[in-house]
Image: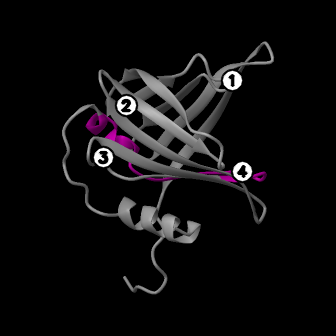
Amino acid sequence: MNAAFLVLFFLAAASATPIEPSGAVQRLAWLQGCWELVSPERTVEEVWLPPRGDSMLGLSRTVRGDSLSEYEFLVVRERGDHVTYEAHPSGQPATVFLSSSVSETAVVFENPEHDFPQRIGYQRSGTDSLLAWIEGTRDGRVRRIQFAYRRTRCARDPAKRD
């Protein structure tokens, strides 16, 4: 399956009307949609599909200039008493993080055995802002990297007219 098809699929599905699922993943419905962080050095985009089948799918990409520097496929789903966050970064093996807290406005996932990060979090701030972060210990130092996202319009198929 080609990458352009996957991106178009994610963007089209993110703008679709969600079906109301049940379960813990539903509490994370506030993540759905398109988010963007723009700085002079890079643009980071994250797209989350609405909850369905006790799961959410996400896609992230970081672009520096005209070049893709990082990408990640994400799966959030229920597993027993936890919600899991499965990160598939830039073609590397997947890493699974377990929820340590889940609410209608924030979620934190942890994997203390992972090299870096050991924690991943998201916190909604109003309807158009999302703070995401990764944190943990690397080379004996505690590090936290934040992503202050703004909601953005999901891309539309240029062949279609509104």
**Is tag 1's residue or tag 2's residue first in the polypeptide sequence?**
2
Helix, strand, or loop for circle 4?
Answer: loop
The answer to whether the residue labelled 1 contacts the one labelled 2, judged by CB atoms less than 8 Å apart, is: no
x then y, percent, for residue 63: 71, 57
Q: Nearer the viewer, mark 4 or mark 3?
A: 3
Which residue is found at the position 38% from the left and 59% from the top? Answer: 14
How far, Cα to Cα, is label 2 from label 3?
15 Å
Name the residue type under label 3. Pro
- Disc 2 target residue: 105
Asked if residue 56 lies in the magenta stretch, the reply is no
Q: How many marks?
A: 4
- Closest to the camera, between mark 3 and mark 1, is 1
Q: Which residues are magenta?
A: 25-43
Q: Earlier in the sequence, mark 4 or mark 1?
A: 4
Looking at the image, do the residues carrying marks 4 and 3 touch, with CB atoms under 8 Å apart?
A: no
Discs 4, 2 touching: Cβ within 8 Å: no
Question: With respect to residue 50, does 103 lie above or below?
Answer: above
Give how far apart the Cα atoms at labels 4 and 1 are: 27 Å
Amino acid at pointer 1: Asp
Reading the image, the residue beneath label 3 is 51
